[in-house]
Image (cartoon, rainbow, N blue to C red):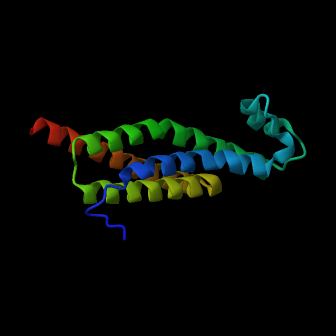
Amino acid sequence: MLSLDTQNLSLYSIPVVWATAFLPTMLMENTSPKSYNNIAPRSSTPAVATNKAFSPEVVARIERMNGAHKNGMENLPIWVAAVLAATVAKVDVFTLNTVSIAYIFGRVVYNYIYFNQKTEAQSYMRTAVFFSTLGLPMYLLVSAAGKVASQ
């Protein structure tokens, strides 16, 4: 049986967090399959914006999915660094595991809000989730630094 206080499972969070960043791309492709260009995939989102076959709501959702994807990829390196630093520094396993679970949950919530937001108030909720979630890898990095400094 898995145990959060005896087995370091945090390294498994790295591919899971990557998947939360990649999922919006897959959803974008499923939302606009005829506009996806595998030769130049980064041109697909702008092509949807000019395609009159898509409603403004669908275009806006695809643009938000693209934003969520970019945000996830931009935040992946700090998560990887935090997990690796905390693992090498031997930060408490329970802390590593619970922070990893919280970070995955935060990224899923962030994506959900980003995909579905339609009001400025909802965008502020997304921002609040982003910054509270960003605190988690920072916490691991500071914990790792403290462990290393005390050796």
Find residue 134 and report its horizontal and vertical position in percent: 39, 46
Camera-nearest residue between 75 and 14: 14
Farthest residue in the front direction? 1
Q: Quadrant of residue 145?
A: top left
Q: Could one spot residue 61 in this view of the protein? A: no
Question: Nearest the camera: 107 or 46?
Answer: 107
Q: Residue at x 90, y 46 (%)?
A: 53
What quarter of the picture does the C terminus occupy?
top left
Total numbered labels: 0
Can the viewer see residue 73 in this picture?
yes
Can you say whether 125 is above or below 45 in the image? below
Q: Is residue 119 left or right of residue 79?
A: right
Q: Nearer the viewer, residue 17 or 106?
A: 17
* Residue 42: percent from left, percent from top: 71, 31
Q: Is residue 53 left or right of residue 49?
A: right
Tell me the residue at 16%/42% (across/down).
Answer: 147
Check the image and name the residue furthest to the bottom. Answer: 1
Q: In which quadrant will I find the N terminus?
A: bottom left
Q: Based on the displayed image, in which of its 4 quarters is residue 150 positioned?
A: top left
Q: Position of residue 149 (x, y in %)?
A: 12, 36
- Residue located farthest toward the left when viewing the structure as drawn: 150
Where residue 48 appears, x then y in whole percent? Answer: 81, 39
Q: Nearer the viewer, residue 73 or 109?
A: 73
Outermost residue toward the top in this view: 40
50 shown above or below 60: above
| 123 lies left or right of 97 | right
Give the residue displayed 64% in from the left and 57% down from the top: 116
